[in-house]
Image: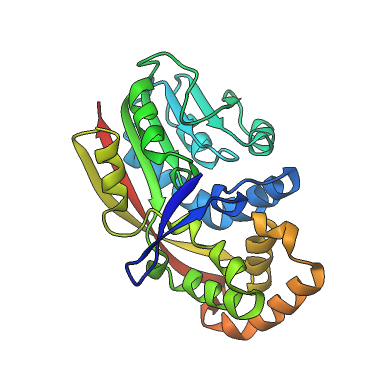
Amino acid sequence: MIRPRRFPEGTVEEIEMTDHDRGQLDTSGAEVYESLFVPSLFGRFANPIAETARISPTDDVIDVACGTGALTRAVRARTTGRVVGVDINPAMIAVAGRLGDDIEYVQGDAASLDFDDDTFEVAVSQFGLMFLDDPSLGIKEMGRVANRGLVAVWDSIERSDGYLSMQKLFRSELGKEAASSLDAPFAMGSVGVLESLFDAADVEHVEFISIEGTGRFESISQWVTTEVRGWTLGDSISDAQLAHLTEKAESHLAQFATDDGVVFGMTTKVATWKS
């Protein structure tokens, strides 16, 4: 698929979406994602985001682009109703299925959800919208199968000093293509991008808020390893390159090291609506 990519200068370039942009992982990558990314980053936002969805105790809920189920499990803790996680990546679904009790995990396309209209009370999606081929269609499908919805995306990379520094490190040590792998997670954070997707999906009565939080890794080495091995970049970076990158990172990212590990701020943009 061709998707416009916005750069800080305000220019727009059409690029071919790659696995970097879609966030597609094999089984080993999905396992690293769950064991390192989820506790250090995604899981830290799951409870605040689930709370924002205002799930009632008996609501049926679908989590779209669920990954390994960080938000799905937080949803499960809030309702006795049916909880379904959908993701197009079979590796993500396989890992999620080993972790969540009383949750249905289904491999499926967010652009064509295999459920009838109004099957669920609530549809949620955490940090997955930016990887859909057609994000506005994904929003429209969520609105079709549920009465209420919530979408959470990362704010722009400029709002995360940690990842902005990581991207600069990637660019200097691995090159422009490797650095661009960090663009995709933050693609919906630019001003007006998320709002325009809801306009395109013909969804009204949307409210937007921000949730502040932090990313935390045990060490700079763990953070770098997670970014490389827990992302699609892993297949293209050798062990020697990773060792070199980690050595450089110890000084380049030293400002984020504390007595409690590596800590940096993150902001998520959250949209909620009622059909």
- Residue shown at the point (31%, 43%) measured from the top left: 197
- Residue 226 drawn at (x, y percent): 65, 61
Q: Nearer the viewer, residue 28 or 19?
A: 19
**Left or right of residue 70: residue 95:** right
Q: Nearer the viewer, residue 15 or 20?
A: 15
Q: Quadrant of residue 229?
A: bottom right
Instruction: Give the quarter of the figure containing the C terminus.
Output: top left
Q: Residue furthest bottom?
A: 251
- Colour mapping used in the image: rainbow
- Residue 54 drawn at (x, y percent): 31, 34
**Left or right of residue 73: residue 269:** left
- Residue 19 drawn at (x, y percent): 61, 50
- Residue 117 drawn at (x, y percent): 37, 15
- Residue shown at the point (39%, 46%) measured from the top left: 152
Count of picture labels: 0
Q: Nearer the viewer, residue 42 or 132?
A: 132
**Left or right of residue 187: residue 37:** right
- Residue shown at the point (47%, 72%) measured from the top left: 164
Q: Nearer the viewer, residue 3 or 169?
A: 3
Q: Quadrant of residue 9?
A: bottom left
**With respect to residue 45, does 203 lie above or below?**
above
Q: Residue furthest top?
A: 116
**With respect to residue 241, does 68 lie above or below?**
above
- Residue shown at the point (33%, 32%) measured from the top left: 149
**With respect to residue 102, does 13 lie above or below?**
below
